[in-house]
Amino acid sequence: MKLTDMLLRNLKPKVHRYIIWADHGLGVRVSPKGKKSFVYMYRVEGKARFMTLGDYPKMTLAEAHKAHAEARKKVEQGIDPGAEAVAERAEERQAPTVAVLVAEYLEKWAKPRKRSWREDERILKKDVLPEWGRRKAREITRRDVIRLLDGIVDRGAGIMANRTLATIRKMFNFAVSRDIVPVSPCQAVRAPAPEQRRDRVLTADEIRALWHGLEGAKRMAEGTKLALKLQLVTAQRKAEIVSAAWQEIDFTDKWWTIPPEKAKNKMAHRVPLSPLALELLQAAKKISGDSPWLFPSPQTDRHITPEAVDHALRRAGLEALGFIFVPHDLRRTAASHMTGMGISRLVVSKILNHV
């Protein structure tokens, strides 16, 4: 029997399921509820096999003929198309979701390699998981990435959209390397917002206002205040400041030795401690008690995080001072004022631990 659209539309349900057969094992199955499906009956190694090609009219008659021809060709090659389809569906069901990918990325890539992995985790939990968490990772398209970033930009967070793109790009590059996805959906996606290169340097008056402003910031923990002051006084990186341990501090010879695993360039670095730096460290020692950390976290047995300093600074409302800054500006400020005092750029570069 030749299958036509008119024939398919006019097939009526019966009490029991039945099949109308065409040539070469192609047929149409009609259920008691009227559901119509294209089927294929064939033999592999002398055994009869049966597979469903698709449902009509979602699968058109032309598509059914094409699927039937492809299945017949596989049978001629000794391949069981039904078993292959079952395996593909099982693989699809077992394919990692974005939520699984996020967890694997954080545990196997971000945590071992990035001191800022908590920021990756925060970004992924805030914007990525709510949108994509249940979807298969390999289903995410470039258009999905663009829509996600556009949504972040639309809420007025363009720079955060850039950071989100950077994070998901790293995550999908990791997924490609682990054979979770064949290609990254972030390829050729550009940062949605223009970046502004930071060159903020606090003036002497602003440093004075900041110093006294920190002392009067009642909503900020004393340890956080000292961490910010120590960053300005030593010109070291925020992550190195907050993760410092007392065993790294030599009060006698007045050195702070940053171990290679904490340094950004993975090279051990000795920081000279001025009298003011030593004074700040003594104050931190009174607060930290018997903790091994200069700035212990009140919630965990670890040190405070770099992000906690950022949040504390925002909560304290230091904008009331009349100027705005971020912690990294303090390091830049220290370096700029040192060169302004006549200290050579080579010496300043050594203090900053630049390669």
Image: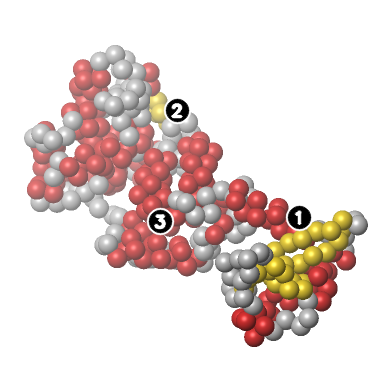
In percent of width and height, residue 55 lies at 62, 69
Q: CA distance from mark 3 to mark 2?
A: 40 Å
Quadrant of the image occupied by residue 67: bottom right
- The residue shown at (72%, 69%) is 19
**Of helix, strand and loop, which one carries label 1?**
helix
Q: Tell me: residue 116, above or below residue 34.
A: above
Residue beneath label 3, please?
131
Mark 2, residue position: 259
Task: Residue under label 1, please give it.
Answer: 83
Q: Residues within 10 Å of mark 2 (few under 14, many from 20)?
A: some
Give the spatial CA distance, label 2 vs label 1. Answer: 57 Å
Cα gap from disc 1 to disc 3, whole angstroms: 34 Å
Q: Is there any visible trace of residue 117 in the rendered image?
A: yes
Vertical position of residue 74 compared to residue 298: above or below: below
Tag in front: 2 or 1: 1
Q: Disc 3 vs disc 2: which is toward the camera?
A: 3
